[in-house]
Image (cartoon, rainbow, N blue to C red):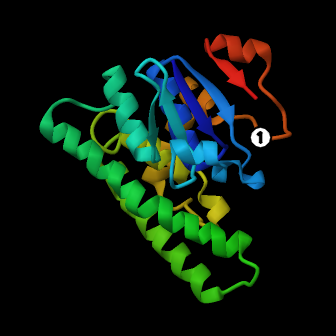
Amino acid sequence: MIKLYTAPTPNGHKASVALEELALPYEVQAIDLGQGVQKQPWFLELNPNGRIPVIVDQGADNFAVFESGAILIYLAEKAGALLPSDTRARSRVLQWLMFQMGGVGPMMGQANVFLRYAPEKIPYAIERYQKESLRLLTVLDQQLRKSEFLAGDYSIADIANFCWARTASWSGLEIEQLLGLKRWIDQISERPAVIRGLAIPAPIGGEKLSKTEIEATGRKLVE
């Protein structure tokens, strides 16, 4: 059993979508970021960086994994899916995964900070991070105009980039002209496992998953 410590963010959703796609048994503990739970000593024992998501593989001596990209690789290798074993095919998936980890996520995250949360609006910073975020999404678009998915078959690279790209409007980005990207986002959004994964966890204080919804996926939701 995998225990997932998470919150409803793009990085959090990468882990829950992957768990659903891979059909690995797991339980969820929602982390209230607003209350700083991720900075509590018990959580820092799992992730010294104090960020979600974190998984603990209870069937492997409670082995903890932090960093969303590392979690995706661990889960894919554990399940033997969504990450090819062939050296070149594996490398292609990892290249696009690193593209998200090193570029799309950090740039869109900074765009969000300066657009949504900074106490002072700094036009230069907003423009700088929005422009770079859109450039990176355009790179994805160019790839997706040539192929159905980023690295051949559907993989953890698609999960990682999708969970961020789908939130482009929250970063103030207009992507209607990126037809390859839009097609891909719409296609992945319709996958049943993705729909389930994006509902994990329910927002703190918000609507909770019903008992039927929880039982339908064979998992347990821990509050």
**Residue positioned 19% across, 38% down in the render:** 89
Residue labelled with disc 1: 203
Tell me which corner region of the image, top left, top right, bottom left or bottom right, holds residue 141: bottom left
Tell me which corner region of the image, top left, top right, bottom left or bottom right, holds residue 114: bottom right
Tell me which corner region of the image, top left, top right, bottom left or bottom right, holds residue 170: bottom right
**Residue positioned 33% across, 45% down in the render:** 150
Give how far across and how far down residue 207 sits, in percent. Answer: 84, 33
- Quadrant in which the C terminus is drawn: top right
Give how far across and how far down residue 60 sits, in percent. Answer: 40, 21
* 16 sits to left or right of 67: right
* 72 sits to left or right of 11: left
* Circle 1 Cα neighbour tier, 10 Å, few/some/many (<14 / 14–19 / ≥20): some
Direction left: furthest residue: 87
Q: Secondary structure at mark 1?
A: loop
Q: Inspect this view and state whether residue 200 appears.
A: no
**Residue positioned 27% across, 51% down in the render:** 95
